[in-house]
Image: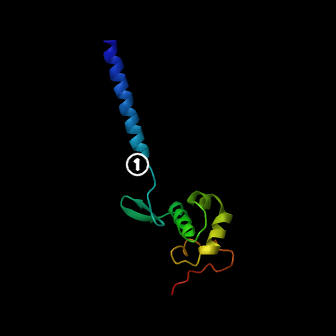
Amino acid sequence: MSTYRTLALASLAALSMQVTMSATAEAKIHCDGPYQMSSGYPIRTPYCEDNYLATVARGYGMTVSGAQVRHSYNLKRDVCQVVGNDTRVSEICVGVRRDGSNKIWTP
């Protein structure tokens, strides 16, 4: 009888770990460019914007991550100074650039 209980408890523990792990994986934020996907709809969020800004900056040769941009206003300002004229991120950099060109340029 005790072997059966031990086996049942071990199975229950394994199942609860599996459920916990899958719930944690579902909580991850999914970004599509500067948009966070929520219930299949894109929502513009600062988290995804910062990740996208870092992605564009890496395309220009800068070595920054989304977390670094998110946690340092000065770094975000510096990144916007370099890549802020790129139409993909010009809206993200409005109000951040220190050269005063906080307007969105469109051809």
Residue 20 at what x, y percent from top left?
41, 38
Residue 26 at what x, y percent from top left?
40, 48
Residue 45 at what x, y percent from top left?
50, 63
Up-down relation of residue 51 to residue 81 (above or below): above
Q: Residue at x 39, y 28 (%)?
A: 13
The residue under label 1 is 26
Q: Is residue 86 left or right of residue 19?
A: right
Instruction: Look at the image and tell me in which quarter the N terminus lies.
Output: top left
Residue that lies at the very extreme toward the front in this rendered image: 61
Up-down relation of residue 1 to residue 27 (above or below): above
Q: Which residue is nearer to you in this view: 66 or 45?
A: 66
Residue that lies at the very extreme toward the top in this rendered image: 1
Quarter assignment of residue 32: bottom left
Q: How many marks?
A: 1
Q: Residue at x 55, y 63 (%)?
A: 50
Give the secondary structure at mark 1. Answer: helix
Q: Amino acid at mark 1?
A: Glu
Q: Residue at x 44, y 44 (%)?
A: 24
Quarter assignment of residue 46: bottom right
Up-down relation of residue 56 to residue 103 (above or below): above
Q: From this viewpoint, is residue 94 visible?
A: no
Report the colour scheme: rainbow
Q: Residue at x 63, y 66 (%)?
A: 76
